[in-house]
Image (spheres, rainbow, N blue to C red):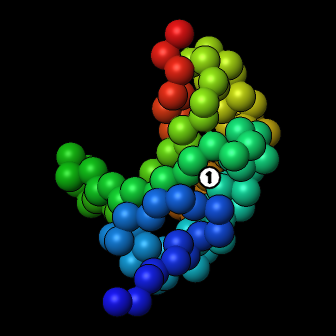
Amino acid sequence: MIKKYPLVEGVDREDSRARDLLMLDTDLRDVVSEGVFQLKRAFGGAEVHIDYLIDHEDEEPDPCVIVTVFPDMPFDDAHEIMDEVEDRWVLDNMNRAGGRFSFEVHPLQHK
C-alpha cells in the first residue's frame, strides 16, 4: 500500500475530497498552504486538519475547504489567537481563493 502524504505541508490530516480539490485548484492550494503556515506559527505544534465542505443551501454551491486547528490551550486563549490570525492574515487573503476556505479553532481545553 502506498502512503499518501498531505498535499499541504504541516497538515496532520487531509480529507481525500479536500486533497482532490486542492490538487485541481492551485490558487486555493497556495492560499491554504500559506494559511496553514500562519496557523502553525501562531499555535505552535497544534494539530491541523483540512476538510471538504459544500454548502447545498447555496443556489450555486462551490466546494471549499475548512482548515481546523486543535491547540492544547484554554478556549479563550485559542480564540484570541485565532482572532489575531484572522485580522493579520485571513481577511487580507480571502479573496485570493474566491472565499473558498475558512479557518476554525477547536481548543482541546474547554475551560
* Image x and y of residue 33, in percent: 65, 65
Question: What residue is at 60 percent from the left and 34 percent from the top?
Answer: 71
The tally of labels here is 1
* Image x and y of residue 16, in percent: 35, 71
Q: Would residue 79 be seen by someone viewing this image from the given angle?
A: yes
**What kind of residue is marked 1?**
Met
Question: What residue is at 61 percent from the left and 18 percent from the top?
Answer: 74
* Residue at the front extreme, as displayed: 1
* Residue at the top extreme, as displayed: 111
- Circle 1: is it few (<14), some (14-19), or many (20+) Cα within 10 Å? some
Nearest the viewer among 7 and 100 is 7
Left or right: residue 38 versus residue 16 is right
Asked if 109 appears above or below 47 in the picture, the reply is above
* Residue at the bottom extreme, as displayed: 1
* Image x and y of residue 34, in percent: 71, 61
Asked if 4 appears above or below 61 in the picture, the reply is below
Question: What residue is at 49 percent from the left and 53 percent from the top?
Answer: 49
Q: Which residue is mark 1?
A: 94
Question: What residue is at 66 percent from the left and 32 percent from the top?
Answer: 82
* Image x and y of residue 36, in percent: 65, 56
Q: Quadrant of the N terminus?
A: bottom left
Nearest the viewer among 46 and 41 is 46
